[in-house]
Amino acid sequence: MSCIFCQIAAKEIPSQLIYEDDELIAFYDIQPQAPVHFLVLPKKHIPRLTDMTDGDYPLIGKMARVATELAEKEGVSDGFRVAVNCGEQGGQTVWHVHMHVLGGRQLNGCLG
Ligand code: AMP
Ligand code: ZN
């Protein structure tokens, strides 16, 4: 399997895992853009947000919930950013849908 996030989910390559259940995992981003920067994603391989189908959308709600719970655990619940990059022009580089959660510094309006 060539998808790096599927390999992380399968424990074929290591990560700094901070959450796991039957459907989702979360781990710290290898190139953090903020003092707290982790990713939340489904174990199911879905390349992009636009590839999700009706049965997948509950996963997004669950990802938001896990992102929020982990933001609390990480001590950034006063303010953090959740972002999903979709497609090349949207800045996506890993083709397995994921939610970025960033916090621990002042985040400004422009996403760049
Ligand atoms: P995106 O550009 O939205 O597709 O985000 C992909 C993110 O995955 C980037 O922030 C990378 O730093 C991160 N990333 C890539 N490989 C790994 C890895 N092996 N472990 C943790 N984070 C990774
Ligand atoms: Zn994958």
Image: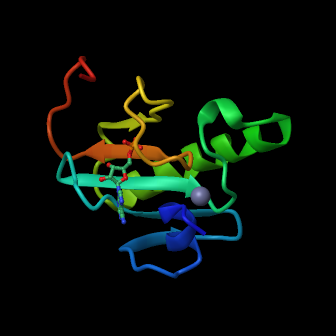
Q: Is residue 33 above or below residue 12?
A: above
Q: Is residue 44 above or below residue 110?
A: below
Which residue is rendered at x = 65% and y = 29% of the image? Answer: 50
Residue 21 is situated, as x and y percent measured from the top left of the image, at: 64, 70
Q: Is residue 12 above or below residue 6?
A: below
Q: Is residue 85 rendered to the left or right of residue 102?
A: right
Which residue is rendered at x = 42% and y = 54% of the image? Answer: 39
**Residue farthest toward the front in the current orientation of the protein:** 2
Residue 18 is situated, as x and y percent measured from the top left of the image, at: 43, 70
Q: Is residue 90 rendered to the left or right of residue 46?
A: left
Q: Quadrant of the C terminus?
A: top left
Q: Quadrant of the N terminus?
A: bottom right
**Residue farthest toward the top in the current orientation of the protein:** 109
Q: Colour scheme in the image?
A: rainbow
Quadrant of the rendered image containing residue 2: bottom right
Which residue is rendered at x = 15% and y = 33% of the image? Answer: 106
Q: Is residue 76 rendered to the left or right of residue 50?
A: left
Q: Is residue 94 above or below residue 51?
A: below
Quadrant of the rendered image containing residue 110: top left
Residue 23 is situated, as x and y percent measured from the top left of the image, at: 69, 63
Which residue is rendered at x = 59% and y = 48% of the image? Answer: 63
Q: Quadrant of ligand 2?
A: bottom right
Q: Nearer the viewer, residue 15 or 65?
A: 15
Q: Nearer the viewer, residue 72 or 51?
A: 51
Residue 34 is situated, as x and y percent measured from the top left of the image, at: 19, 47
